Amino acid sequence: MKHHAMVSEHCWPARRLAGVLLFACMLAMALLAGTAWAEEETAAEENAAESADAWPKGHYPLPERGDVVGEDYIVEAQGGETLLDIARAHNVGYEEIRRANPDVSVWLPGEGTEVLIPGRFILPPVEREGMVINVAELRLYYYPPTREGETPRVETYPIGIGREGFDTPLGKTKTTMRLKDPAWYPPRSVREEAAARGETAPAVVPPGPDNPLGRHAILLDIPGYLIHGTNQPDGVGMRASRGCVRMFPEDIESIFDRVPVGMQVHLINQPIKAGWDGDTPYVQAYQALEEQEAGMAALMETLAMLERDEEEPTVPLNYEMLRELLENPTGEVIALTPAPAPAPEPEKEAEKEESLLWDELAV
């Protein structure tokens, strides 16, 4: 027994040491697991950020709340590129780049010249489904269908629309067919214009560099109207077509296979857009296609777009700034920040200081 007692006395420190080692091992494993989990979470966040950064220009996560996407930013002109080259590379059209850079030469901005890219947009005030084409804005918004687990998003592209006398139609329609390398059959108006010049328009223009439809066309359920590419990309971002919607060749190619037949297409004429980003109200106004005064109707329409739910905080609007934006539309996304409090008049300020002085002397 004494021998066993001695063995027990010798073994107890060993058992205690084993327990300490086991606890230390478990603690180390927990710390390693926590570190690994933190690293995985950080990596996931970084991958998500990289994934968002890797999205093509003009693609944005759809805001869960709010109406504003994108950001304006500045680039420097390189070599002999034109303002139109820069616009195309950054997903904006002719009118947009001109409005944003009125003092920059269109054909030769010059090496190192700073060019503002107007890349911030208020989403149109209609249902976010299918395609929305805002002719006043010269821009198309595409809300692609997403699978479970995918981030809902919006893609936006500059477009060209019908020139005066060939207005692009408005209303809801749908896509009916997709054509790769379409042939173009000149309409009667083209044939008549050619005849007036003493020329004969061809009966059909086959696919190729002379085809004004480009290589991709999406037909609409409006006879004679379609969304298509172009062999004259400089016309994207202005009123230059015969009523159809033009896109840069690379833009329509990017959506061509993803736009299903039967998708809703909503054509609107919305020169004034308004919405929220957090608790800040914003307005984006464009020149109306027709003569239209920025009167009370435009003001009331804008205020209606900025109505909020009762549980959301009330934000004071700068009505003077809103009036200025409606009268002088620039296409910029402008925050309607509250007007600053008027500075006190010098005489009133002096009177206030004198009154405070008398109050101190009277104590």
Image (tube, rainbow, N blue to C red):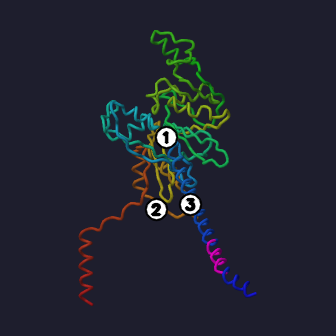
The image quadrant that residue 105 belongs to is: top left
> Disc 2 to disc 3, how far (Cα)?
42 Å
Q: Which mark is residue 57?
A: 1
Label 2: state its secondary structure. Answer: loop
Amino acid type at circle 2 is Pro
Residue at position x 49%, y 38% in the image:
136
Query: The C terminus is located in which quarter?
Result: bottom left
User: For the magenta stretch, what is the residue range?
Assistant: 12-21
| Mark positioned earlier in the residue sequence (1 or 2) | 1
Residue 172: within the magenta?
A: no
| Mark positioned earlier in the residue sequence (2 or 3) | 3
Amino acid type at circle 1 is Lys
Query: The N terminus is located in which quarter?
Result: bottom right
Badge 3: how crowded within 10 Å, few (<14), some, or many (20+)? few
Q: How many badges with numbers are in the image?
A: 3
Label 3: state its secondary structure. Answer: helix
> Disc 1 to disc 2, how far (Cα)?
34 Å
Whole-percent x and y of residue 128? 60, 45
Q: Which residue is mark 2?
A: 316
**Is 187 situated left or right of 291 in this image?**
right
Whole-percent x and y of residue 138? 49, 36
State which mark lies toward you, 2 or 3. Answer: 3
| Mark positioned earlier in the residue sequence (1 or 3) | 3
Q: Are marks 1 and 2 in contact (CB under 8 Å)?
A: no
> Disc 1 to disc 3, how far (Cα)?
31 Å
Q: Which residue is mark 3?
A: 38
Badge 2: how crowded within 10 Å, few (<14), some, or many (20+)? few
The prevailing secondary structure element of the residues shown in magenta is: helix
Whole-percent x and y of residue 346? 24, 69
